[in-house]
Amino acid sequence: MDTFITEEAKIREFVRKNLVRQDLAHDLDHIECVVRLAKHIAMAEGANLRVVVPAAWFHSPITRKAGKGGSRGERSAEKARRLLRTLPFSKSEGEAITRAIVESSAESLAGSIRSGSPEARVVRDADLLDSIGARGIARVFTYTGSLRIPGGIGCVEWDIDNPPRIPPPKGKQEQSAIGQFFSHLLWVKDRLSTGTARSLAQERHAFMVEFLKRFKAECDAQA
């Protein structure tokens, strides 16, 4: 275990130095939170921590240059592969880690959320969990604020208790912060693969619903 702690420290330092400069919603704080959640879920679900932990550290793009070809997940996996060769991971562990990175990436969400290895599902669930609840609320406003989108904060135009799933804007146009709740965040709980993550999501989802109701009430009072 002491050896693995040392290995993880080296992985963290590598990620810290090579992390792509994005908005504050996708910085090192987000990655560290995903790692903590992934450890918790992995232990509860019996997943391999030696695969889950490195994959969680590399779940976000961590290359300073976008490069050519391949998805962001594949590029992060290649970076991880190069680092893992310098650390005492077996060949099979390295292959499992890089596979989990690709299978838990944002691109994988376009396919079946339940596909992939148990370790990939753990990392993917950890990433999704950090998009809801109190942290999710903070992150969505941080993200949309950094983009300075025309829609700004937005307002609640839909039934909160029976929300419609509104489609995201087409092209490069970004959605208001409130709009993102109704196009994505309110459905995160239904996309989780593990029982542990689904259990954790219940309170986080309820908190978002209560926030939206309070937000709408305050906006309506100012009308």
Image (spheres, helix red, strand yellow):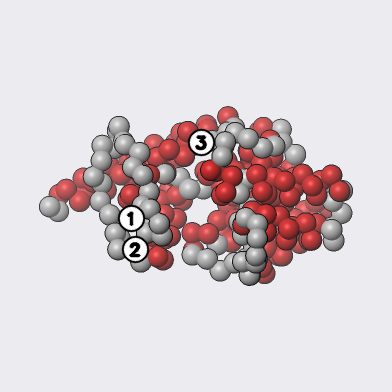
Q: Left or right: 87 with respect to 171?
A: right
Q: Label 3: which residue?
A: 191
* Residue 51 pos. (x, y %): 75, 45
Q: Counting other residues with Cα less than 10 Å from the Cα at mark 2, is it few (<14), some (14-19), or many (20 or more)?
A: some
Q: Left or right: 205 with respect to 122?
A: left
* Residue 83 pos. (x, y %): 78, 61
Sooner in the amino-acid sequence: mark 1 or mark 3: 1
In the rendered structure, which amino acid carries the disc numbered 3? Arg
Q: Label 2: which residue?
A: 149
Q: Secondary structure at mark 1?
A: loop
In the rendered structure, which amino acid carries the disc numbered 2? Ile
The structure residue drawn at horizontal position 42% and vertical position 44%, both measured from the top left corner, is 185
Q: Label 1: which residue?
A: 176
* Residue 99 pos. (x, y %): 72, 46
Q: Counting other residues with Cα less than 10 Å from the Cα at mark 3, is it few (<14), some (14-19), or many (20 or more)?
A: some
Which quarter of the figure has residue 203?
Answer: top left
